[in-house]
Image (cartoon, grey):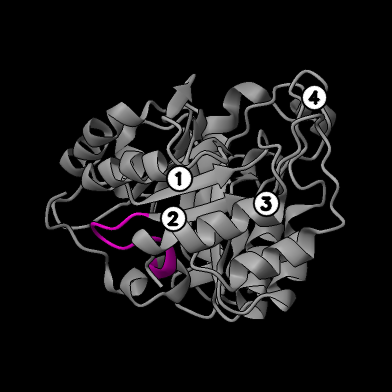
Amino acid sequence: MSNLILPQHLATNKAFTRVFQPKKLSFGLIAPFKGYPEGPIPDMDDHLELAKIVDEGGISALWIRDVPFYDPKFGDVGQVYDPFVDLGFLAAATKNITLGTAGIVSPLRNPILTAKQAASVDRLSQGRFILGMSSGDRPVEYPAFGYDFDNRAERFRESWEIIRTLNEKEFPKMATQYHGQLAGNIDLVPKPISSHLPMITIGRARQDMSWFANQSDAWIWHGVDPRRSKDIIKEIEELGDGKTWHPFGYANFLDLSENPDEPARLHHNIFLRAGRNTLMEFWKQQEQDGVAHITLNLKPTRRPAKEVLQELIEDVVPHFSLV
């Protein structure tokens, strides 16, 4: 990675810097922070207990997904609960870890309410929140909301602008194409703790590469071939302003083997099975390639959740830890 740097408003943001630091790799966990390979709906009875275990370890972030419906063809409902309700619950139960969304399907949500929910979580967590936004990848949901699936890229960008404006400006004026009008006579409260709420893109969101290089504070993709990471990072840098670092990361399903030396095997770019020793070798190479963050989804693992979390926290993460 070149000598690009974070802008001051991000370099001093504790939520962002717990996850993203130049030339270092960090890890996050995607809710429900456990394996559930037998079906689409996890048992959530230990949700709080697992979150507390992770909060006390060296993992950087807990990521909450936005899955409004159970689609049998997709076969996964994430953490079951509404993301912002769950984030409020976790904000009260954790002390250190960054809380993030991965990601809010912005074309299906009113951006004004999303802005208020995001600022509220940021305040209640004492500045530990990152708003991750996506355009959605489940076409079946759009008719239920009465929205057009084909213009989600445009509405994603407009939602992004509205949320940024409402959280950073007082009594803003703004005309929009797909949403309402702001006449400068009303203001959104609360505002985030810092002047700039970290906002990152989850997935491609149907945006071109220049978007990630200039608009998004960071980018977490899924389904990307890790061998392409170095080239993707180079392209982001070349399309940027030549000064600002926009971190890149990706998501993986992880099945952590009981055999610490089991070779790392990657299936369809998203499913990774490995022992912890070979896993560290794999991730050290990714760190050298400039990858800043990897979000781990433990859905395929059959090992007890506490056992897997303790192994990651005690034997893997300390070799990369930012905290």
Percent across and percent down for residue 182 are 61, 61
Q: Quadrant of residue 321?
A: bottom left
* Relative image position of residue 206 (x, y in whole percent): 48, 29
Q: Secondary structure at mark 4?
A: helix
Point 51% across, 37% down: residue: 252
Residue 134 appears in the rendering: yes
Which residue is denoted by mark 1 in the rendering?
276
Q: Residues within 10 Å of mark 4 (few under 14, many from 20)?
A: few
Q: Are marks 2 and 4 in contact (CB under 8 Å)?
A: no
Badge 2 crowding class, 10 Å Cα cut-off, few under 14, some 14 to 19, many 20 or more, is some
Gap between marks 1 and 2, in whole Å?
Answer: 7 Å
Amino acid type, label 4: Pro
Say which residue label 2 marks: 316
Q: Residue 37, located in which quarter of the rendered image?
A: top right
Magenta region, residue range: 17-25
> Does residue 57 lie above or below 65 as drawn?
below
> Pointer 1 and pointer 2: residues touching (CB < 8 Å)?
yes
95 with respect to 17 (left or right): right
Which residue lies at the image location 84% right of the left edge and 31% below the top edge?
A: 70
Residue at (52%, 38%) from the top-left corner?
Answer: 259
Element carrying mark 3 = loop
Question: Sequence order check: which comes first, mark 2 or mark 4?
Answer: 4
